[in-house]
Image (spheres, rainbow, N blue to C red):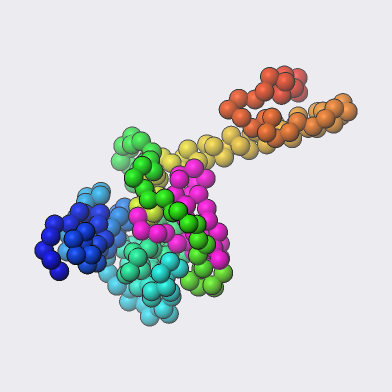
Amino acid sequence: MCGAAAATDATRCEHCNARLATVACPSCFGMMFIGQQFCPHCGGKADRQDSSEQAQPEPCPRCHADMEAVVIGGSKVRECPKCEGIWTDAETLRQICADQEKQAAVLGLPTPLPTNEGVEIERQIRYLPCPVCGDMMNRINFANFSGVIIDVCRQHGTWFDRDELRRIVEFIRAGGLDQARAREKQNLEADRRLAEADRFLSRHGASPVFEEDVRSSAFSAVAQVLFDLMR
């Protein structure tokens, strides 16, 4: 519109406010300009095409524009041309996560977990409707500690606002899912120990151990003695 230079992560021109033509990268799902051969975020080669399937129109949960059915890499998703959010069904998301874990295992590159610095925080939390059934979706912190809050309809799929899927891909490539599994394992072990402590105390007529007394960076001294005795 005006010919001014634009940043690679911009969606609108900062001078004339014209919307810039961007699409999602097939590798990291970051936004890149139409016509770019390689993604400025990860260097992946552009690979995007319109879906050949005749899909029923579905409204964007965020801005209500009709989403476009596209194939990004090998993933069939719906993309909002206005707010640049992405909608995936459950199976597609599982496949994306599995593919990213495989790539991380093959590359074996030790990368730090991404931070949320510079990420725009949603000031006014708003629950979004599922574009398929219309029910309000649940807001979930992906993998419980990624810091990326996604909107999920357990029956139909997941909504990602602009750049949220890219941040999740970075999280997975940095080994975030492995750390999430390790945390879940620790929580299950804490639950098991808590149940054992409660059974031990109930047999001896004592008060049960409260969960907040046990779930901490280290078990309390009293709880640890009880667990040692039970062994």
| Residue occupying the point 25% across, 57% down | 10
Q: Which residues are magenta?
A: 136-163
User: Could you say which quadrant of the image residue 218 lies in?
Assistant: top right
Q: Taking the image as drawn, is residue 93 in sight? A: yes
Residue 135 is one of the magenta-drawn residues = no
Residue 230: image x %, image y %? 76, 23
In the rendered view, would you say 73 is above or below 53?
Answer: above
| Residue occupying the point 51% across, 68% down | 130
Residue 76: image x %, image y %? 37, 66
Residue 78: image x %, image y %? 38, 68
Whether residue 22 sits left or right of residue 147 in the image: it is: left
| Residue occupying the point 39% across, 54% down | 164
Quadrant for the N terminus, please. Answer: bottom left
Whether residue 57 sits left or right of residue 138 in the image: it is: left
In the rendered view, would you say 159 is above or below 105?
Answer: below
Is 2 in front, or is 75? Answer: 2
